[in-house]
Amino acid sequence: MKQNKKSCDFKTCFLCRECMSEWIPAIEACKKNYHFKKGELIFKEGTGLKGMYFVNNGLVKVHKKWVGDKELIVRFAHDGDILGHRGLGIDMIYSISATALSPTDLCFIDLDFFQKTLKVNQGFLYRLMLFFAEELKISEKKMQNLAHMSVKGRLAQALLSLREKFGVSESGAIKFSLSKQDLSSFVGASYETVFRCLNELVEAHIIELSGKNIHVRNEKELKEITEINAPQMVI
């Protein structure tokens, strides 16, 4: 990590978008900009919460310890997204880790200024509350899927969610280059099992692989796989 002279545009990130315009000069005075290299750890699970990070540009994986020495990728963050908010609470401890997947520029504000921002900016507080609620729903669904959905179903769901979040390139590939190992950690399964399921989808002409690029060729069938494998609601 190194301090970055390059500043944000005060329009892209979640903080600047949702705060009142009168608060922007305070953000400019208090923020710090950092650059992280690909593979560099931004913060570590279990360490004390120092503040919030906002992605100016780049790509970050948010992950936590899983079974044994494996990791589970909770989500991916890119331009405009917030990092570190999962550490808020009574203990103020980062409950997850964050690692740059590409050269990434981040804006950092310390915890004290963040708390002041919450008190002053009711609009930002409200939007953050909605964001927390949505994240909770997504996390609960992912935990349910891990327990009850097949690996193939989880893989299909992961590909659809990545396509929705990052869009597609002109060639039709998901606009997000991801290693097979990270894809396995996102799905919550072994590398070998995910690799086998990918090959099955390729053989069925549902997706096409080109290096790290994944093309969804039949979105309808991919959705059908998630529906067939979806866990049944228990009342």
Image: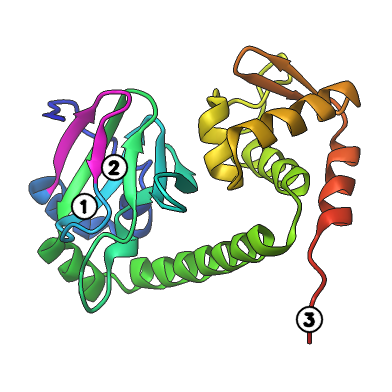
> What is the chief secondary structure element of the magenta stretch?
strand
Residue at the front extreme of this rendering: 68
Q: Is residue 86 visible?
A: yes
Provide residue 84's location: percent of width, then percent of height.
29, 55
Identify the residue shown where x is 26% and y is 59%: 94
Q: Quadrant of residue 145?
A: bottom right
Q: Reply yes or no: does residue 39 show up in magenta.
A: yes
**Which region of the structure is painted magenta?**
31-43
- The residue beneath circle 3 is 234
**Residue 170 higher or lower than 107, as above or below:** above
Instruction: Give the CA separation, mark 1 to mark 2.
Output: 7 Å
Q: Reply yes or no: does residue 9 show up in magenta.
A: no
Amino acid type indicated by mark 2: Phe
Instruction: Give the CA separation, mark 3 to mark 2.
Output: 46 Å
Q: In terms of sequence position, does the residue under pointer 3 or pointer 2 come before the other?
A: 2
- The residue beneath circle 1 is 24
Q: Which of 102 and 229 is in front in this view?
A: 229
Identify the residue shown where x is 18% and y is 60%: 49
Q: Are marks 3 and 2 in contact (CB under 8 Å)?
A: no
Q: Nearer the viewer, residue 69 or 58?
A: 69
Instruction: Give the CA separation, mark 1 to mark 3.
Output: 48 Å
